[in-house]
Amino acid sequence: MTIKTLCSDMLLLAVFMLMGFFIREYIKPLQKLFLPASLIGGLLILLLGQQVLGVVTVPDSYSGIPNVLIDIVMASLVFGVSFNRDKIFSYLDYVCVPMTAYGLQMCLGTGLGYLLSQIWPGLPKGWGIMGVFSFHGGHGTAGAAAATFEELGVEGNMAVGMVLSTFGLIMAMMVGMVLVNYGVRKGWATYVKEPKAQPSWFYGGTLPEENRKPTGHTVTTGISINHLALQTCWLLCALFVGRQLFSFIGNFWSEIKVLPSVLHGVIGGAVLWKVLEILKLDRFVDIKTIKLISGFLLELVVFTAMATLDVEFISTYIAPLLIYTFTLCAVTVPCVLITAKKFCKHEWFEKAMMAFGAATGNTSTGLALVRAVDPDSNSSAGDTHGVYTTLTCWKDSFVGLAPMWLMTGIGLTMGVGAALMVGFAAVGFGYFARKKQQA
């Protein structure tokens, strides 16, 4: 592949990404399900490609893009993470809610995947772990885990992850809105007596002027360096630092060389950010722009992953994927509702909706469910989830570690999931539930 052919491949990607955008704009149900344009465009070129209709040719380069770009995306997850001790302690009760669900999905999903593999033996090895990454992290995290599996010689989990992530988005909104309506009628909501409809611009279309927000801020003069170029360099440098650290340590500890490349970004991002803070150079970093770049790369990951799905594989194994999705969603609902009601002192239902949306779809679906019961943004559920994300950034390492564990069996992965579930549930019931009763 040459630079010229890669450019041609990106031109085709841009055309179908725009087609996905306009399809989403004019087919309103797609907006309500929070399906992104990259997913729709990727599915469109898949249907028109050589696997189905044969109208266009999906470039071979697309299959390799997710594995490369996801390392950079992973670096952005911890780049810029800082801790405010006072804020942390005030939100710890909520942390136990999604982490209990995370452990449950990790343990049950791995075991269920193994059982279904006995009925459908062609399913890829370790596929059961993909649920927790797809439902808690979305297409990007699922893609990262699938990339790790591919490094270990296991194919097929990219298709599993993309399908489960899409199913998760649909389940998050359909089941979530049922929960919203039921909870409001039961009087669980703090701020509304009936679910509120969102304005049309919330789902798509042109944003009103008063709702448009800056995507970032320049940190130095453009005469010195283009702002976007500077922030991109920081992000790429984070991955470079991670790779060099792993390479250096590998000279003395050979076992580290077998760790998946997605960990290079995670470790590199954390190390570089700490160094920048110590040297007082963090003032040259704009986190909003870093996240914007990461989001752009994630769009490319989702599009190319969807465009190269194995259609034959999906059609063969759609039944176990549906069984898996319905089962994990069914156990997540009571888990989140019970733990939120028991643990959270304030706004438990709003926080439960945030946790459910984020544990089956992604953060956006969680925020959408919260908006339905808190249209004026009075709830702290969104901020609370942000603190949770910061505190639990360490779990992103499971994207690289869990596939390795599954190469030798399901015991360790199920055990870690069970330990997370029991541990956070024990803290919740043993401390926060008692504290709430005494208040």
Image: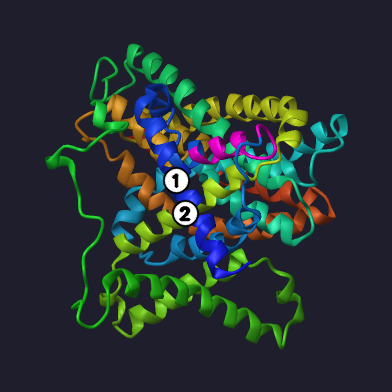
Name which residue lies at 39% across and 24% down.
Answer: 27
| Residue 120 on image: x %, y % | 84, 31
Q: What amino acid is at disc 1?
A: Val
**Majority secondary structure in the magenta region:** helix
Q: Which mark is residue 60?
A: none
Task: Verify whether residue 324 appears in magenta.
Answer: no
Q: 356 and 38: which one is in front?
A: 38
| Relative vertical location of residue 420 with respect to residue 1 in this rendering, above or below | above
Mark 1 lies on a secondary structure that is helix
Q: Are marks 1 and 2 in contact (CB under 8 Å)?
A: yes
Q: What amino acid is at disc 2?
A: Leu
Q: Is residue 259 left or right of residue 176?
A: right
Name which residue lies at 26% across and 20% down.
Answer: 196
Q: CA distance from mark 1 to mark 2?
A: 6 Å
Residue at the spot of label 2: 11
Question: Magenta region: which residues?
Answer: 41-53
Q: 8 and 385: which one is in front?
A: 8
Residue at the spot of label 1: 15
**Structural crowding at the residue carrying mark 1, measured as other residues with C-alpha within 10 Å and reported as few (<14), some (14–19) or many (≥20):** few
**Structural crowding at the residue carrying mark 2, measured as other residues with C-alpha within 10 Å and reported as few (<14), some (14–19) or many (≥20):** few
Q: Is residue 224 left or right of residue 111?
A: left
Protein image colouring: rainbow
